[in-house]
Image (spheres, helix red, strand yellow):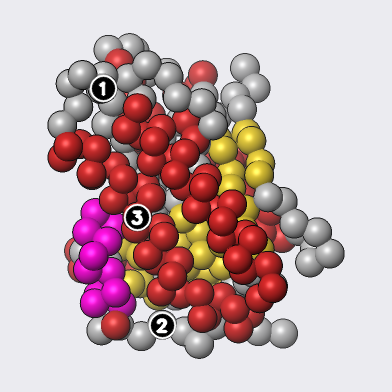
Amino acid sequence: MATPTHLITGAGSGIGAAVARRLHARGDGLLLLARDAGRAKELAAAFPGARTLVGDLGNPDRLSWALSHQSLPDRLDSVLHIAGVVDLGAVGELTTRTWRAQLDVNLIAPAELTRLVLPQLRVSQGQVVFVNSGAGLYAHSGWSAYAASKHGLKALADALRQEEKPNGVRVTSVYPGRTASPMQAKVHQQEGKEYDASRWIDPESVATAVLTALDLPRDAQIDDLTVRPGR
C-alpha cells in the first residue's frame, strides 16, 4: 500500500505544525505549502524528507500560476487547510483592505487550492479538511471580517462535500475554540488582554481531532467536528 501524502497549509506554527509533526512522525508523506522560498527552506529543515511548494495564500489569483511551475504528485490523500489570518475590528472601522486580506487567505485561497488539487484527490478518493473556527459558527462583536471568512469556509466545505461525494472525496470541517498559538497571542494583543496559553486548547489536541477525521475508516465520515476548551 502506498504511503499516504498530505498537502498542508500553515505547517509553520500552531495547529498546522502540530498536525505536520504527527503525520511526519508516523512516516506519512508531506507536501508543505510555504508563502515564499525562505519559508519553504525553514519547513524543509523542520520536517526532513518533506516536499515543499511555494504559493502565497494572500494572493490567491497567483496560486494557479505558482503551482503550474512546480511539480505536484499524481495523487494526494488529503489537503489540510490550516493556515489563517485574523485582524479584529468593528464594522464601522474596518477598511476594505482588512476585509480582503482575511477573505483572501481564509476563504478564497482554500477554494482555489482545493480546485487545483482536486484531480489528485479524486485519484486517491482522498479527503479535504478545513480547520475552521468557532467564529465560523458564531460571530461576535469585533470579529465580523474574520467570522465572515470562516462562515464562508463552512459554506465552501458543505457545497464541496455534496459535489465530490460521487467521486469518493470526503470533506470535513473542524471548528476549534480558542487555541494556544501565535494567532491567539495576536488576538489577545488586539483585545488588550493578557495572554495565558494554559487557558486555551493545546494545538496537539486539535491535531488529534484532525487525525481522527482523517483516519476514520471509509465506511463513515465526519462532516463537522467542534473542539472546545475543557477548562
Q: Earlier in the sequence, mark 1 or mark 2?
A: 2
- Label 1 vs label 2: CA separation? 40 Å
> Which residue: 29% across, 42% down?
102
Closer mark to the observer between disc 1 and disc 2: 1
Q: Nearer the viewer, residue 178 or 128?
A: 128
> Which residue: 68% across, 67% down?
165
Q: Which residue is denoted by mark 2 in the rendering?
A: 72
Question: For residue 112, which quarter of the picture?
Answer: bottom left
Label 1 Cα crowd, 10 Å radius (few <14 / some 14-19 / many 20+): few
Question: For residue 124, which quarter of the picture?
Answer: bottom right
Q: Describe residue 92's horizontal placement relative to residue 18 as left or right.
A: left
| Residue 179, position as x, y percentages in the image | 49, 31
> Which residue: 27% across, 61% down?
60
Q: Which residues are magenta?
A: 57-67
> What amino acid is at disc 3?
Ile
> What amino acid is at disc 1?
Val
The answer to whether 174 is drawn above or below residue 185 in the figure is below
> What amino acid is at disc 2?
Leu
Q: Which mark is residue 91?
A: 1
Q: Earlier in the sequence, mark 1 or mark 3?
A: 1
**Predominant secondary structure, magenta span:** helix
Decide whether residue 205 is among the magenta residues: no
| Residue 56, position as x, y percentages in the image | 25, 61
Q: Which residue is denoted by mark 3 in the rendering?
A: 108
The answer to whether residue 78 of the structure is visible from this angle is: yes
